[in-house]
Amino acid sequence: MLTIIVPYYNREQYLPRTLDSIAKSSYRPIKLILVNNHSTDRSQQICEEFADRHRSDDFSILLADEQEGGAAKARNRGLELSTTPFVYFFDSDDLFDKDFLEIVMQELDESSDLIVVPTKVSVGGKSPVARIYRLTANPAAQILTGHLSTQAMIFRTDFLRQIGGWNESLPMWNDWELGIRVLDAKPRMRWITSRSFHTVFLHPDSLTGGSFSQRIGSMRKAVKVVNDETQGRYAKPLFFRMEFITGNLLKEKNRGEAAENKKLTRRWFADRSVITNLFGWLIRRYVAWGGRGSWRLALWLCE
């Protein structure tokens, strides 16, 4: 059995669409936990009305609260309340695929700690396209591509609890950090490749929306946390990830933050070869000029 956990904070504009897409799922029974993360708009009322309309013997809906701010905190609250062998986290502004549960439930058994599924992404309201989906358990790939996003991971509940759940210190990139920690724990994995599920929307209101300049503090914190957690074991891919970030800051013409990022990169990843430094510089310049796909070169250099 699987529980879907949806945290929300001031999402009255998006919640009706998201909840309606879950209700249209072709599979039953459904267990759903909606976690209010101290919303101040009509989000809680929307969830209460949804529960009144849809709660039934084969559609269990639990309304929960988490007064401390942060999506990771709200997700951990849902994890704490979950009583099923598997758990899945979904964001409150995305679209749930109606066939997802019907396909995924056939793959769930206690021999897997993690089931990974492909998803689609819509940027700025454009038509959704498939996200990067790499069938690899290499943590370097997660560091460089973030292919294990929130909606891509279905966890065995006990496994997620054993590795500590979501990192509540990170306001964003917490699924990126969790994906690294998951792979570092060497889970028993299963990959679904039949097609992409869900539609993930990136917009200014989303946690991962906006420019690099607007999010730079949270990005740096996530990189530093991962480097500290892993005691430098993934210094090389993290170094290249910082070069990606610096290149994007230069692309946005934010030379002040780009200079700060270069300074932190030198401090955090001091022990680098001349060749690694050279490729880091090339990647940074390529990204700054608007180049795409530099993660392929970086991943090849890390393998």
Image (spheres, helix red, strand yellow):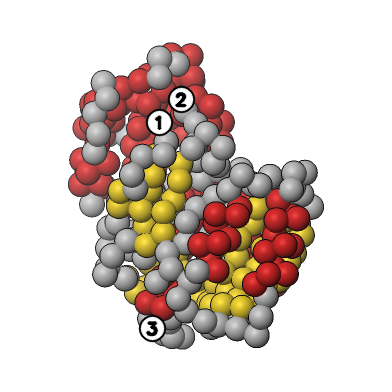
Residue located 48% across and 71% down the image: 25
Question: Tag 1, which secondary structure?
Answer: helix
Question: Tag 3, which secondary structure?
Answer: loop
Q: Which residue is mark 1?
A: 245
Mark 3 and mark 1 residues within 8 Å of each other at the beta carbon:
no
Sequence-first tag of 1 and 2: 1
The kind of residue on which mark 2 rests is Asn
Where is residue 246? Give x, y as percent: 39, 26
In this rendering, position of residue 231 left or right of residue 279: right
Residue located 43% across and 85% down the image: 109
Sequence-first tag of 3 and 2: 3
Please name which of the two marks, 3 or 1, marks the residue nearer to the observer: 3
Classify 10 Å Cα crowding around label 1: few (below 14), some (14-19), many (20 and above).
many
Where is residue 32? Give x, y as percent: 62, 71
Count the marks: how many? 3
The kind of residue on which mark 3 rests is Gln
Classify 10 Å Cα crowding around label 3: few (below 14), some (14-19), many (20 and above).
few
Quadrant of the rendered structure where residue 4 is?
bottom right
Mark 1 and mark 2 residues within 8 Å of each other at the beta carbon:
yes
Q: CA distance from mark 3 to mark 1?
A: 39 Å
Q: Which residue is mark 3?
A: 106
The kind of residue on which mark 1 rests is Ile
